Amino acid sequence: MRNVGIYYAFWTHEWDVDFTPYIKKVGKLGFDQLELNGGTVNSMSSKEQKELKKMADDEGIVLSYGIGLQKAYDVASLDEKVRQNGIDFMKKMIDSVANMGGGMIGGTVHGYWPSTLPKELESKEPCWKQSIKSMKELAPYAGERGVKLNVEVINRFEQFLINDSHEALAYVQEVNHPACGVLLDTFHMNIEEDSFGDAIRRIGPYLSSFHLGETNRKTPGTGRMPWAEIKQALDDINYDGPLVMEPFVMQGGQVGRDIGVWRKIVKNPDLDKLAADAAKFVKENLV
């Protein structure tokens, strides 16, 4: 059974917030899972982390974690000091998630976000090699602690290392560890993939998590994404991982700025109703 989840920042203008209101509401809106900012969790005390996990358990909600590494923690950096800072940061985050019972960390666990190819380089191969070196250290560390690292395939305008399913497949096969999987996201796929179905089938057993959103990052079911094709491909590979929607419709704050929401995507939105309608749509069309 595929869990249906949502990213907490659908409701927020800032990344660092109190997660309590969202843990307490998402189950009532029809969700099984809530994805949190791993960076915020990483800054919490062990006691706070365990209290957050207990709250989720009490609400019947599975937690997962997302991260866009900052440049200072770039695990693909050619500067070994920066790369090691990234390793240390990621190990701390893995320990934090392990302290909360384990689970998935997805996003740019393989580099920093947003980023582009360094000006002094003509090829991303040197950064790719650094990233692989880092992941070959991080994946075993995560696996031993009940944590899975999901490398997100992100479009060329936000990140440069892994832009499509071909590159993602090559990356995870080179890392070659069960604690390193792939996170596909329909928003990014719409930009980079020739076929949604072929991309999903290409990743196949390496697909660990799947992000949902319309072409303009509205909630699923409100746009023109080919959900029937996506559902068929997920069925073809017997995918049983989470379906986590990651819509962004609000201007303002660091979230709006980082995601690039410069207009009212939805006028005067009732966010809870949008979320509940989307949860119903996903359960009826993708589960």
Image: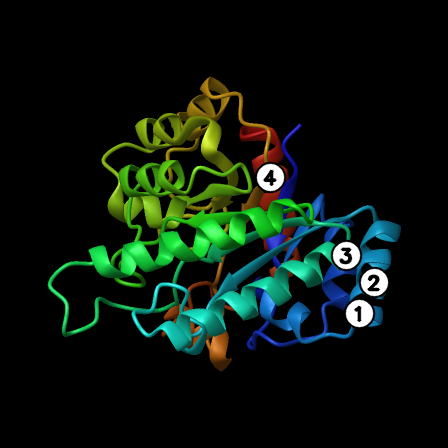
Residue under label 4 = 242
Q: Earlier in the sequence, mark 3 or mark 2?
A: 2
Where residue 264 appears, x then y in whole percent? 42, 70
Left or right: residue 184 versus residue 126 is: right
Please tell me in which quadrant of the rendered image residue 30 appears: top right
| Earlier-in-chain disc, 4 versus 3 | 3
Question: Horizontal and vertical percent for residue 90?
Answer: 55, 64
Question: Which amino acid lies under the numbered mark 1 shown in the image of this protein?
Answer: Ser
* Circle 4 Cα neighbour tier, 10 Å, few/some/many (<14 / 14–19 / ≥20): many
Q: Which mark is residue 50?
A: 2
Rendered view: 198 above or below 159: above
Q: Residue at x 31, y 27 (%)?
A: 198
Q: Are marks 3 and 2 in contact (CB under 8 Å)?
A: yes
List the residue tagged with mark 3. 100
Where is 282 relative to 218, above or below? above
Helix, strand or loop for disc 3: loop
Amino acid on which disc 2 is placed: Lys
Instruction: Give the label, 2 or 1, closer to the camera.
Output: 1
Q: Earlier in the sequence, mark 3 or mark 1?
A: 1
- Can residue 269 be seen at all in this image of the molecule? no
Q: Residue furthest left?
A: 122
Q: Residue tagged by mark 1?
A: 46
**Secondary structure state at the residue bearing disc 1:** helix
Q: Residues within 10 Å of mark 1 (few under 14, many from 20)?
A: some
Picture quarter containing residue 184?
top left
Judged by depth in the image, the label closer to the viewer, 4 or 2, is: 2
Please state which of the two labelled residues, at mark 4 or mark 1, is closer to the viewer. Answer: 1
Q: Secondary structure at mark 2?
A: helix
Q: Are marks 2 and 1 in contact (CB under 8 Å)?
A: yes
The foreground one among 208 and 258 is 208
Label 4 and label 2: CA atoms lie apart by: 22 Å
